[in-house]
């Protein structure tokens, strides 16, 4: 028992060092091209200096590392297993009666641990720095004014509305539409505002027309608002406060990429999006992809082992390593394709996020069974 444990720890250490090296190399390589692209975008803005561009590039580093982690696990694992096979260490271990499943357990566990650390620990850091980088890009490198302006400055949302519900009745909803939406000084404002208030059965209770609205301190403040009730004349214009659980930050985040939210923030934010009438598909897909990351990294470790543990004397090493790289990129393309299907609604979100990793796992296990058991 001592020998397999010692061997497993040794292989796990070699595997982990190779993965960390591959992660640093891939992150640096991708960050270089990202920095060049930021420089290109900054060339059209004379006031943007090299220091600001470098700062944005540094803020994006955790996000880039999170994206390349599965490839780092695969490439680092392939290098580690290939080196151990070339030095005959794995060959001697297998000749001594140690099964491949025994000495692969520790590296696969390490790979899953890399994914778990990335999901639980790196994701919050990545989301915070990526959100800050996006803010700087929108402020200094973009021609538009931000996410709301990219959506035409128009806002549609739905929120809970309990003001018209009686005791024991189902809560109603308020559907708000505003044009010319902008965020200034941390306050969201809109013009030509229309609010439809519905009861718990979906029946229209009232309609509010206002010249402007501002979101602050947990309420929409509707200026020059006229309330229109069924079979009644509109009320005189007045200021109306409409309570809400939305905040300016939440409205802005609903238009921002899901990568700006950590795995710990996503469940509550998804629930808020669904209550407010926003689509939560991409956020749910991103959440499931983060949860599936440990399985994906473990799968990449098995794929690396399956394509790199072939003895060198049997030839075709270059072909096997090339096949492993091809399999990794094929898995990446399948995951992106499944993501597109998931965002379009053609596939359930959970299936779109977990199926590529599960399919790769089956491929790797099949290959290892063929190598180990013939």
Image: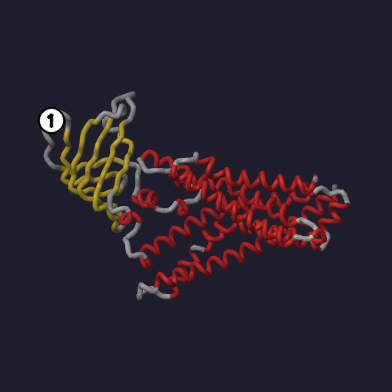
Q: What residue is shown at x 26% (from left), y 40% (from top)?
A: 242
Crowd rating for badge 1 (residues with CA inside 10 Å; few <14, some 14–19, many 20+): few
Whole-percent x, y for residue 204 in the image: 24, 31
Q: Residue at position x 28%, y 37% from top?
A: 174
Q: Judging from the image, what secondary structure is the residue with disc 1 in?
A: loop
In percent of width and height, residue 163 lies at 27, 33
Residue 107, compared with residue 346, is above or below; it is below
Name the residue carrying label 1: 232
Task: State whether residue 171 is above or below residue 156.
Answer: above
Residue at point 84%, 54% (across, down) = 93
134 vs 359, left or right, is left
Front residue of 336/180: it is 336
> In the visual, does 324 lie left or right of 10?
left
* Display colour scheme: secondary structure
53 relative to 312 in the view: left or right: left
* Residue 38, image quadrant: bottom left
């Amino acid at each position: 028992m001592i020998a397999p444990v010692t061997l497993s720890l040794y292989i796990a250490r070699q595997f982990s060092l190779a993965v960390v090296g591959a992660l640093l190399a891939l992150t640096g390589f991708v960050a270089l091209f990202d920095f060049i692209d930021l420089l290109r975008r900054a060339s059209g803005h004379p006031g943007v200096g090299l220091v600001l561009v470098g700062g944005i590039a540094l803020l994006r580093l955790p996000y880039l590392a999170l994206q390349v982690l599965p490839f780092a696990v695969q490439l680092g694992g392939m290098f580690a297993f290939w080196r151990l096979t070339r030095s005959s260490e794995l060959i001697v271990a297998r000749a001594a009666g140690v099964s491949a499943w025994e000495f692969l357990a520790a590296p696969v566990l390490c790979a899953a641990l890399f994914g778990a650390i990335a999901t639980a620990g790196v994701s919050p850091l990545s989301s915070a720095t990526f959100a800050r980088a996006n803010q700087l890009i929108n402020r200094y490198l973009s021609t538009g004014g931000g996410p709301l302006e990219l959506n035409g400055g128009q806002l549609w949302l739905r929120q809970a509305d309990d003001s018209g519900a009686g005791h024991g009745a189902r809560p109603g909803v308020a559907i708000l539409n505003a044009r010319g939406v902008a965020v200034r000084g941390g306050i969201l404002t809109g013009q030509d505002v229309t609010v439809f208030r519905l009861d718990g059965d979906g029946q229209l209770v009232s309609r509010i027309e206002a010249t402007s609205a501002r979101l602050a301190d947990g309420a929409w403040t509707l200026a020059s608002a006229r309330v229109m009730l069924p079979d009644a004349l509109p009320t005189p214009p007045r200021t109306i406060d409409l309570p809400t659980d939305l905040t300016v930050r939440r409205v802005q985040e609903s238009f921002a990429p899901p990568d700006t939210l950590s795995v710990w923030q996503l469940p509550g934010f998804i629930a808020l999006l669904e209550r407010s009438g926003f689509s939560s598909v991409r956020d749910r897909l991103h959440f499931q992809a983060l949860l599936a990351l440990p399985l994906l990294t473990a799968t990449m470790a098995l794929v690396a082992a399956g394509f790199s543990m072939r003895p060198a004397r049997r030839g075709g090493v270059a072909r096997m390593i090339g096949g492993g790289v091809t399999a990794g990129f094929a898995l990446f393309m399948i995951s992106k394709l499944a993501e597109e299907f998931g965002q379009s609604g053609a596939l359930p979100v959970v299936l779109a996020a977990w199926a590529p990793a599960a399919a790769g796992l089956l491929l790797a296990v099949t290959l290892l069974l063929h190598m180990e058991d013939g």
